[in-house]
Amino acid sequence: PQPETGIPPAQTSLPLTGAGMSQVVSVRYQDKPLVFTTSSDTALTLQLPALSSPGIDVVFVYADKTMAQYFIPVQKPGQ
């Protein structure tokens, strides 16, 4: 599930919840790997790159080689 409102541009990490998080082997942004930690099969914390509005698209790569795109909305500065 995506956040309903954007996250602040200065935010450096983002906790995510969902099924199969322990199967994530890579998270990529602009074809570069992002650092992440998995604390359970339903929780993952993503270290974010520099952010700008309207947001960024990241791709989750799973152990079975499937991929899922995820849009992270980012607030405009001053919101």
Image (cartoon, rainbow, N blue to C red):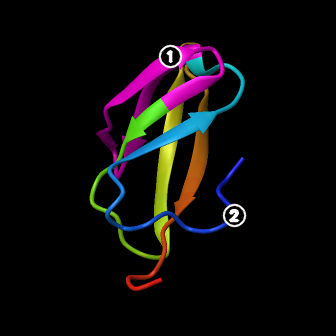
Closer to the camera, 65 or 69?
69
Q: Residue at x 66, y 21 (%)?
A: 42
Is 5 above or below relative to 69? below
Which residue is label 2 attached to? 4
Question: Which stretch appears magenta?
Answer: 22-44
Q: Quadrant of residue 78?
A: bottom left
Q: Please, what is the dominant secondary structure of the magenta stretch?
A: strand
What is the distance, in whole Å, between disc 2 and disc 1 at their CAs?
24 Å
Q: Residue at x 64, y 33 (%)?
A: 17
Q: Say which mark, if any, is on residue 5.
A: none
Of callouts 2 and 1, the N-terminal one = 2
Q: Amino acid at mark 1?
A: Ser
- In the rendering, at what x and y percent does residue 21 appear? 60, 21
Which residue is label 1 attached to? 39
Q: Secondary structure at mark 1?
A: strand
Is 65 above or below relative to 15? above
- Are circles 2 and 1 on residues that touch, CB within 8 Å? no
Crowd rating for badge 2 (residues with CA inside 10 Å; few <14, some 14–19, many 20+): few
- In the rendering, at what x and y percent does residue 72 appear? 53, 57
Residue 17 magenta: no
- In the rendering, at what x and y percent does residue 77 appear? 38, 82
Q: Residue at x 37, y 68 (%)?
A: 9
Residue 38 magenta: yes
Is 72 above or below relative to 27? below
Q: Secondary structure at mark 2?
A: loop
Closer to the camera, 79 or 21?
79
Q: Amino acid at mark 2?
A: Glu
Q: In the image, 11: left or right of 20?
A: left
Is 14 above or below relative to 45? below
Closer to the camera, 5 or 73?
5
Q: Residue at x 43, y 67 (%)?
A: 8
Crowd rating for badge 1 (residues with CA inside 10 Å; few <14, some 14–19, many 20+): few
